[in-house]
Amino acid sequence: MTYAYIARQPILNRRKDTIGYELLFRDGPENKFPDVSPELATSRLLTDHFFSAHYDTLGNCLGFVNFPYESLINRIPTLFPAGNLVIEILEDCPPSDDLLDAVKEMSELGYIIALDDFIPNPQWKRFLPYISIIKFDIRLVSIAKAQSFIHKLSKSKIKFLAEKVETYEEFEHAKNAGFDYFQGYFFSKPEVLQTKTLSPALHTVVQLCKEISKADLDFAAIEQIISQDVSLSYKLLSTANSSPLVNSKIRSFKQAVVYLGEEKLRKFVALLAIASTQESKPSHLYALSIQRARFCELVYQQFDCDASSAFLTGLFSLLDSLLDQPLEHILASMPVDDDVKRALLDNQGMLGQVLKLIKAYELAHWQEVSTISQALDLDEKHLCDCYTASVKWTTGLVAMS
């Protein structure tokens, strides 16, 4: 049986709003399925994932998809709606007449076309009138060199995207150089490290997260915690009241539980809690925290262990970015288990391995994914299902909020 892999990396604008995701496809860890051509692998991924999970994984954002040469010549992208699909021309595609004809035709049909890992070359000049986005890998082409090219095309309608942006300083440098979009994991690291004490509100959030991660919810305990936070109470009741199933106004948390149900309550409260820590942060950061929590939970359930600790591990994996503090300082003041702390700080224990696994999956580092999966005796197909399920579920929660 052939398995398809998919991961997504967010693409941000100059305000650090998420405008799209690059959907990354492979034929398996370590090129495990050598009999599958790149074109067939692309088609399988698009049919298995882009058709079925397209709107769930993208929402209103753009979906950037790499297409090999033959799939472009054969107009494979035209099988999909042009609305939020960005066709990425891979860097190894030759700038042939056949490719130019295909690009012209797809551009006229309304498709957004991007040049991936672009290196300035006169042979691509005739393609530029049909190109909407040019992506520079700043590890291959320096920001200074890219800036010179951007300046030459300043009067065109082309937008420029900086890939492999790993630090906040690189983001600022690229922004000043004229880039419009940015891709990388700079936003998952603290922009500014500050030493500040934790407010009582964060302790309330931590207590709430611990309660909702338990296998059996203690509704009385959750109600008492939520009642201490006016914002959480208001948001929860507002969500319950917005349900089309509600015939009369819900005025208490107990009523809200009846209408939302245990599962929606558990997950929605998690989203509200983590999002309430710092409203100035990019929305994708909150969603990524929740997605990691769900992925870790689903994977950890296979070990017949209490998955609540795995949920917390994923949920708190980006707290350094959310609070602009070193993670070790934050965890020193938080009432979480030592196993969770060791996983977050040093990737120790099974929790640490599961956390490393989701980070590798997000970055499409399939060799590392394969190594960790084998060490933990995890089925590759189930792992793929867990990731897809966590993405769909997180997108649903974000839409609810």
Image: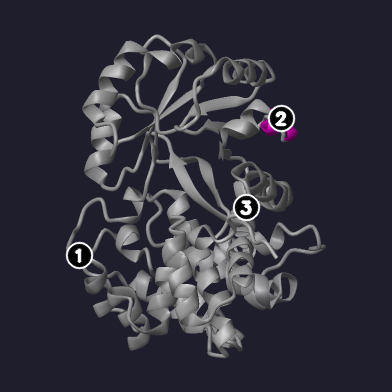
Q: Nearer the viewer, mark 2 or mark 3?
A: 2
| Residue at the (73%, 76%) spot, across then down | 258
Tell me which corner region of the image, top left, top right, bottom left or bottom right, holds residue 149: top left
Q: Which mark is residue 38?
A: none
Quick check: 395 above or below 204?
Answer: above
Q: Which residue is mark 1?
A: 196
Give neighbour class at mark 3: few <14, some 14-19, many 20+ (Cα, 10 Å): few
Quick check: 117 above or below 99?
Answer: below
The answer to whether residue 329 of the structure is visible from this angle is yes
Name the amino acid, label 2: Thr
Q: Residue 260 in the image: x percent, y percent?
A: 70, 70
Is-magenta flag for residue 382? no
Quick check: 210 above or below 55?
Answer: below
- Whole-angstrom CA distance, mark 2 to mark 3, is 28 Å
Q: Residue 282 in the image: x percent, y percent?
A: 41, 48
Q: Which residues are magenta?
A: 75-79
Q: Which mark is residue 78?
A: 2
Q: Nearer the viewer, mark 1 or mark 3?
A: 3
The answer to whether residue 274 of the structure is visible from this angle is no
Label 1 element class:
loop
Q: Which residue is mark 3?
A: 399
| Residue at the (31%, 24%) spot, across then down | 178
Quick check: 392 above or below 267?
Answer: above
